[in-house]
């Protein structure tokens, strides 16, 4: 998915803080690498409006 959203530094700071406090893995562990997607299909989403 290719999602366009308005940046909100407070939201990202809160999410990162929750991951540090409550999870044993980092936020970076949730990214899916391209080799797991043999037939990717991009969905364009614009949530900035």
Image (tube, rainbow, N blue to C red):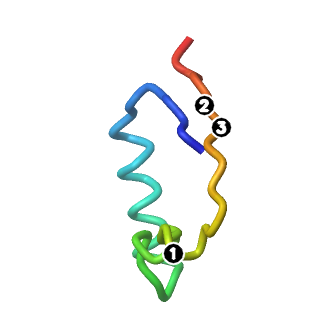
Q: Please identify, in this view, whether the residue under mark 2 or under mark 1 is nearer the observer.
A: 1
| Residue under the point 46% across and 77% down | 29
On the image, the x and y values in percent for residue 47 come to 58, 23
**Crowdedness near tag 2: few (<14), some (14–19) or many (≥20) residues, C-alpha within 10 Å:** few
Residue 7 location in percent, x, y?
Answer: 38, 31
Quadrant in the picture for residue 1:
top right
Q: How many angstroms separate mark 2 from mark 1 (CA)?
A: 21 Å
4 displayed left or right of 45:
left
Q: Earlier in the sequence, mark 2 or mark 1?
A: 1
Left/right placement of residue 30 relative to residue 38 reads: left
Q: Which mark is residue 44?
A: 2
Horizontal relation, residue 27 to residue 46: left or right: left
State the mark number for residue 43: 3
Few, some or many residues within 10 Å of mark 1 (<14, 14–19, 20+): few
SS for callout 3: loop
* Residue 35 image label: 1
Measured along the vertical axis of the image, is residue 34 above or below residue 15? below
């Amino acid at each position: 998915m290719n999602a366009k959203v308005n940046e909100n530094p407070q939201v990202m700071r809160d999410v990162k803080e929750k991951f540090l406090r409550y999870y044993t893995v980092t936020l970076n562990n949730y990214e899916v690498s391209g080799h797991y997607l043999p037939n990717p299909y991009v969905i364009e989403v614009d949530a900035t409006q």
